[in-house]
Amino acid sequence: MAELKSTLNRAGRYAARVREQYGLAARVRELEAELVEARQLNRRVAELTDVVTELLVPLTRRDDAGVDAVLARYRRII
Amino acid sequence: MSAATTAPTSHVDAQGLLLPADATGVLTVSLDGQYVWSFQPVRDGVVRVVDGQRVRAVAWPPALAHLLDGGAHVLVADADGTPYVDDEVRFSGAARRVRVVDQHGHPLAVNKVGHLTRTFAATDQATRTAILSGTARILADLREHGGVEAVLNYGCLLGAVREGRMLGHDCDADLTYLSTKTHPLDVTLESYALERVMVARGWTTVRMSGGDFKVLLTLEDKRVVHVDVFASFTVGGTFYQLGNRSGTLDPSVVAPAGTLELEGVELPVPRDPEAMLAFVYGPGWKVPDPAFKFTDPPAGVRRLDGWLRGYRDDVAAWNDYYRSPRSQQVPRTGSQFAHWVHARLPAGEGIVDLGCGAGRDARYFALNGRPVIAYDSSADARQHAGRLLTKDDLDVPVRRFWANELRTVAVTALEIATAGHHVYARQLLGCLNDEGRAHLWRLARTALRDGGALFLEFSSGTGPTALDPLVRRLDTDQVVAEVAAAGGRVTHLEEGPGLDTEDRPDPRIARLVVRFDDPAPKEHHHG
């Protein structure tokens, strides 16, 4: 009986370890995905910063020709 | 196949190569005498048991696989020239010979990252000198006008240092510059600014990621050589160098640059070329390996992917598609959806074809008297569209549209708003990921706020499409919910059997008309 109890305890501890590891693996996958999302913000912010800094001055000056020139320049690189 | 010239366990067909299980080293593949690919059977293949014999199966690289239509004399040989396969192979029932060439008929080969490019071995001395002189001009512009420490790197540097000439199996010129920026965002902004400088100097460029762009070098015979301009920078003590390299390297290995002569042309190179080559190719860089592949630290690749990439993931696959015989079968006449849209719009109103592919619907709208602007992500698609439209003398600008790149999205939205056109997107939605669709809604909301409609057709429901995974089915309810969340109104929705991207019957196609203008502007009450 004592032997059975000890085996059951060992099995229980093993099951808990497996549960913990699988839970951890899922959490790591989740964290990795969240990290990718955060890293991608670099590029998005860079794209927006680039387009805003290029267009800000002609738009503020209501300089239509200037805006057209910026758009035409963009068309050569995008 | 003849047993006399082909090893008994070797076999070649459209799927790939079966070689003896003990085949090792680097093997090169030639089709009708033209070098097209080199590989390592152990690294690139898997062991299978065929007819009770262990063999190594190696699949064709995708860039080559879709060109294997017809027949070719296949030679697969090791470094000593001993053939594993030396025989005529029919890849398909077509009577033609397999041709691995560019649009001008110049031979192409698969490079170390799986793309088809020209090889220096296939170019004569005068052309090699022209390529290197052009590369020297690009380097001078980067250094003098861009103000960056740009140097020759990768294959050209390896060739220059190890062999005093360009390497036979390398196929592009790669340059790197040492950025002083320590934040990926600033590295990207610097690369954008550098590209603008190069365009202002008269060069044509293609952006590859936030940290690299290509400068297109056009030779006298109209051949175009791609010269990559890669950023290198240090973040958190790790040195990163585009493509995908990362690790420990003291920036003083790069700057201040020295010079080396390659095929009679003097070029700036890293201060310590040997240390750079060991960083790039590993300690074995002195031993030639035409099938070399990079093994980069996965953590570094993940960081570079996250920081700098993600807006042209499918572009290469679409380019391959538009180069394939399969895409040539798609009708060049207007689609059913184009007819449907044309009948619903007042005569003469303009339309933007977003995701125009080979240009069939842009052509249809233009032939029916509508001003048209066409957009696509794939350079090959745009080339097809341009040719189709020019044939009919139609004045339709064909421009690049990358839905995942916000600069393109913003500029395209402004162009559409200025033109006052409607927006038409047939089978585009299923090609975009979540971010791309979100950007498309943003674009439509910006471009169509003063009126105009967005016409959408896509494969709906579940299951694969004939072009999976390039085109995926979408859940119509989800699309409608996304439109609503972006401030759009669906004014028409129908769903039923229709035709897919290639005009094949599709059991479920959805058609939507969406408006983003405010139907009843609210009065503003002051006080």
Image (cartoon, coloured by chain):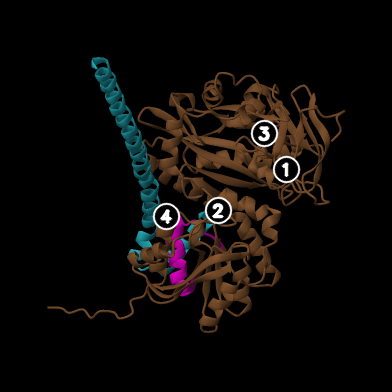
- Upstream in the sequence, badge 1 or badge 4? 1
Q: Which color is chain B depicted in?
A: brown
Work out how far the residue at label 4 is from the one at label 2, CA to CA, in angstroms: 14 Å
Labels 3 and 4 positioned on one and the same chain: yes
Q: Quadrant of the C terminus of chain B?
A: bottom left
Q: Earlier in the sequence, mark 1 or mark 2?
A: 1
Mark 3 and mark 1 lie on one chain; the one further toward the N terminus is 1
Amino acid at circle 1 = Ala
Amino acid type for the residue under numbered disc 4: Asp
Q: Mark 2 or mark 4, which is nearer the start of the sequence?
A: 4
Question: Looking at the picture, which amino acid does disc 3 mark?
Answer: Val
> Mark 2 — residue?
B470
Q: Which residues are magenta?
A: B399-423
- Residue contact between numbered discs 3 and 4, judged by CB atoms under 8 Å: no
Disc 1 with disc 4 on a shared chain = yes
Local packing at callout 1 (Cα closer than 10 Å; few below 14, some 14-19, many 20+) is: some
* Residue labelled with disc 3: B58
Q: Which residue is mark 1?
A: B14
* Whole-percent x, y for residue B447 in the image: 42, 69
Q: Counting residues from the N terminus, which is met first, the one under dot 3 or under dot 4? A: 3
Q: Chain of mark 3?
A: B
The tint chain A carries is: cyan
Where B226 falls versus B470 (above or below)?
above
Residue B408 colored in magenta in the image:
yes
Circle 2: element type: loop
Drawn side of residue B357 relative to residue B5, left or right: left
- Camera-side residue: B13 or B266? B13
Residue B369 found in image quarter = bottom right
